[in-house]
Each structure stands twice: as C-alpha cells, then as structure tokens.
C-alpha cells in the first residue's frame, strides 16, 4: 500500500498538497521530531489527557463500586447517570470554554466527562457479575459488607474495570484532539488544524500518525499494567487461548 501510494504521488496525477507521499511525510516527521516541535505538541496533548483520564478513572471506579454494590447508591445515582450519559462530550466543549477558558481546565473537563462513563459502566457491570457462590462462601467465613466488596467483588470485577479503562483511553485520544481543534494554542489537534489552514498536508499526516502511534503504545501499556496489577486476568486470557 505504501509503495502504491508513493508511486501514485511521484509518477501519477496526484497533487502532493492534497496527498503527500509517504517519503515526504516521513521526512517531515523526522524533521519535526529532531526540532522538538512534535514532542512539544504531543507532550501538551498527553498531559491534558493524563489529568482528565486519571480523574475519570478515580471517580468512575469509586462510583461504580458503590452503585454496583449498594442498592441505595444504585437507586440514587442510576437516573442521574442515564440522564447525563447520552450527552456528547463534544457538545460540552462550548460550555467548557465558557467556564474554564481555552486553557488546561476546559480540556481536562471534556476529557473527564468523555472517559468517565465507560469506566463507570464497566465497573458496575463487573461488580454485579460477581459470583454469588463466592460471596456466600466469604460471608460464611465472617466477611463483612465492605470486606466482601474489596476482597471478593473488586478482584472479580477487575477484568471489566480493565476493559473500561482501555475503552476510555481510546475515547480520550479522540476527544483531546477534537477539543484542541476547537480552542487551543498548542497540542496535536491544534497542530493538525493549523497545518491544514496553510496547506501543510504533510504535517497533518504527521499529526495523525503520531496520534495513532501514541494510542497504540498507550493501549499496549494499559494491557501490560493490567496483567501486572491483576494476574488473574492473565490466567483467564491463557485459559481462553
């Protein structure tokens, strides 16, 4: 595919401004990497994503455990969750800018909202799927309500939580780029949109490739982290294969 793409631009009737060749994109990528420009924009995007994602993970897992385990919490929070969950995080960008400006706060707010619900819903599903036989066995050994939650239900829900974290991470990459395109002064989203305005399509592709590569590395890292923190996930994967 890359060879056909390169040949089409070099020898065909393809405008390199519309579709630059892979070699041109690679050359621009190396140049921006060596100059530090690409690292600067990537670091800003990743920092915003990391803060919002961490807040969403802390809140989503905590609330998910409460809603999944305690009936009173479920009755109170479920209507609120179902009311706010369908709201597109992209639609919140104007409000985020109005409330927090175009700086870090608006990006963190939008990312937190976008990544919160996948983590929350997967945590609730994981808690509710806990084997009742395990719960009864722990109770027969004298485990209390909170001890059951932390030592039985939480480990059982770990694969669900891990899946929710991975899904939320991919959504976070999408939303941070969109939010930076709307209002930002740096970041990969800003870089892509600003380059399109001056017809630097090669830089646009560099931004896209960078996002793709960072997303792949982040997901791989999340998988390794999950296997390290939850060894029973690795055992289940071995059984499935």
Image: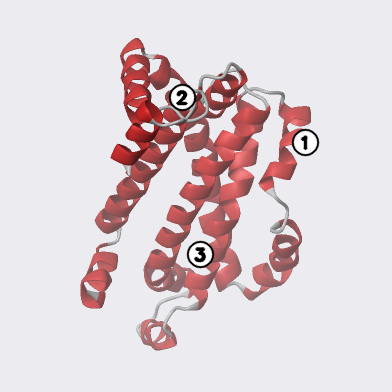
Rendering quarter of residue 135: bottom left
**Label 3 Cα neighbours within 10 Å, binned few <14 / some 14-19 / many ≥20:** many
- The earlier-in-sequence mark between 1 and 2 is 2
Determine the residue positioned at 55% across, 29% down: 189
Is residue 224 rendered to the left or right of residue 79? Answer: left
Q: Earlier in the sequence, mark 3 or mark 1?
A: 1
Query: Which one is in front in this view, the residue at disc 1 or the one at disc 2?
Result: 2
**Spatial separation of the CA atoms under disc 3 and disc 2:** 47 Å
Q: Measure the alpha-carbon separation of dots 3 and 1.
A: 28 Å
- Residue 8: x percent and y percent? 38, 34
Residue 101 x, y percent position in the rendering: 72, 24
Q: Quadrant of residue 193?
A: top right
Q: Nearer the viewer, mark 3 or mark 2?
A: 2
What percent of the width, then of the height, locates residue 229? 29, 55
Instruction: Compare residues 24 and 170 and report the one nearer the observer.
Output: 24
Q: Quadrant of the N terminus?
A: top left
Q: Nearer the viewer, mark 3 or mark 1?
A: 1
Q: Secondary structure at mark 1?
A: helix
Q: Which residue is labeled 3 in the image?
A: 123
Q: Which residue is mark 1?
A: 95
Q: Is residue 102 above or below residue 49?
A: above
Give the residue drawn at x 51%, y 57%. 61
The front one of 66 and 144 is 66
Q: Residues within 10 Å of mark 1 (few under 14, many from 20)?
A: some
Q: Quadrant of residue 28?
A: top left
> Gap in Å between the C-alphas at discs 1 and 2?
38 Å
Residue 3: x and y in percent read 29, 38
Q: Which residue, given by chain and number where applicable, does mark 2 sit on?
A: 16
Is residue 92 among the parts visible in the rendering? yes
Secondary structure under the numbered disc 2 in the rendered image: loop
Tag 1 near tag 2, CB within 8 Å: no
């Amino acid at each position: 595919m890359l060879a056909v793409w390169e040949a089409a631009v070099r020898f065909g009737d393809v405008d390199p401004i519309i579709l630059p060749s892979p070699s041109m994109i690679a050359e621009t990528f190396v140049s921006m990497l060596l100059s530090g420009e690409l690292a600067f924009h990537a670091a800003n995007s990743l920092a915003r994503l990391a803060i919002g994602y961490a807040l969403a993970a802390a809140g989503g897992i905590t609330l998910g455990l409460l809603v999944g385990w305690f009936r009173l919490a479920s009755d109170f929070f479920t209507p609120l969750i179902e009311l706010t969950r369908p709201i597109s995080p992209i639609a919140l960008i104007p409000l985020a800018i109005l409330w927090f400006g175009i700086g870090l706060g608006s990006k963190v707010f939008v990312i937190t909202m976008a990544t919160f619900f996948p983590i929350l819903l997967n945590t609730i599903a994981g808690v509710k799927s806990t084997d009742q036989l395990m719960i009864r066995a722990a109770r027969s050994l004298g485990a209390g309500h909170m001890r059951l939650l932390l030592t039985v239900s939480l480990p059982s829900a770990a694969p669900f939580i891990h899946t929710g974290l991975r899904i939320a991470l991919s959504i976070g990459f999408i939303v941070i780029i969109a939010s930076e395109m709307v209002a930002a002064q740096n970041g990969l989203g800003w870089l892509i949109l600003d380059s399109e305005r001056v017809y630097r399509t090669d830089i646009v592709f560099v931004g896209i490739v960078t996002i793709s590569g960072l997303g792949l590395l982040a997901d791989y890292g999340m998988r390794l982290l999950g296997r390290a923190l939850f060894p029973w996930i690795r055992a289940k994967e071995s059984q499935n294969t």
